[in-house]
Image (cartoon, rainbow, N blue to C red):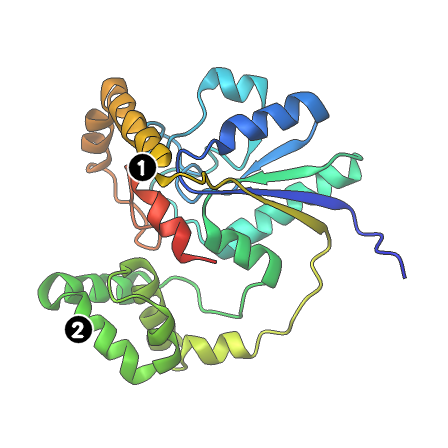
Amino acid sequence: MADKRPWAIFLMGPTAAGKTETAMALHERLGHQLISVDSAMVYRGLDIGSAKPSADELARAPHRLIDIRDPSEPYSAADFRFDALDEMRQISAAGQVPLLVGGTMLYYKHLTEGVANLPSADVSIRQSLEARWQTEGLAALHQTLAKVDPLAAQRIHPNDPQRLMRALEVYYASGRPMSALWAEQQPETFPWRVLSIALVPSDRKILHQRIARRFEMMLAEGLIDEVAASHAVRWPSEQAFRPIRCRRSTSWARHP
């Protein structure tokens, strides 16, 4: 039976691989409608450190799901899935192709596979875990996770505070391991046929040179002032603040 689902494009890749330029070209040549897949660009005011497209670039090729939250508001992978599906439905209903561009691989995973019935973020639990992080270190948190959720501990790197604290938060909020809740998730058929494109330069040296140039441009544009201003804001704990996107190339590689 022929697959009658509409098409969608996923444009992925590490930092400085050329995703924005490629997405803009596809928008201008083919009319594809762009949806940002980035956990930092959703926030207003985090422009330089997130490598957000400039005002001129956004005027040429509008990106949905950019600047949709204030820094004080949490935004989870589940929130992204809800918003992205809504935007994709609107684009497909208009007879156009949604083009999702960005490097937050966890968002792609949750978008296509669904989100388990996990408890919402709990501020008091998260603050307690952050206090333990500061006093005992991440290794102690990972040891705790290994006791209460061995499967999650195997998948989560000991130096990944965001995912580590979320797994513990789920356990303390629900009384059940996050891996068990995920195992109960029913498989879904994604409503779109997906063409996945990964921009990965064959020569890592070239990518490293691009990242270095980007960092120099960020400094010239006022990155230090932006980071200093961010300290006056209480950023949502679930979105661990990573202001310098030139470091995201390694995190992209962690999520197959």
Tell me the residue at 36%/28% (across/down). 47
Q: Which mark is residue 246?
A: 1
Mark 1 against mark 2, which lies toward the viewer? 1
Tell me the residue at 59%/63% (across/down). 114
Outermost residue toward the top?
A: 56
Q: Say few, some or many: other residues with alpha carbon within 10 Å of mark 1 (under 14 / 14 to 19 / 20 or more).
A: many
Q: Say few, some or many: other residues with alpha carbon within 10 Å of mark 2 (under 14 / 14 to 19 / 20 or more).
A: some
Q: Position of residue 164 (x, y in %)?
A: 31, 66
Q: What residue type is disc 2 on?
A: Ala
First of labels 1, 2 by sequence position: 2
Outermost residue toward the front?
A: 203
Outermost residue toward the right?
A: 1
Q: Is residue 150 visible?
A: yes
Q: Secondary structure at mark 1?
A: helix
Looking at the figure, which quarter contains the N terminus? bottom right
Q: Quadrant of residue 191?
A: bottom right
Considering only vertical position in the picture, is 39 above or below 225?
A: below
Viewer-side residue, 6 vs 204: 204
Q: Position of residue 40 (x, y in %)?
A: 39, 40
Q: Secondary structure at mark 2?
A: helix
Q: Is residue 195 left or right of residue 92?
A: left
Q: Is residue 128 left or right of residue 47?
A: left
Mark 1 → mark 2, Cα distance in angstroms: 29 Å
Outermost residue toward the left?
A: 135
Q: Which mark is residue 118?
A: none
Viewer-side residue, 198 vs 68: 198
Considering only vertical position in the picture, is 153 above or below 126?
A: below
Q: What residue type is disc 1 on?
A: Cys
Residue for badge 2: 140
In the rendered picture of this protein, how many numbered marks are placed on residues?
2
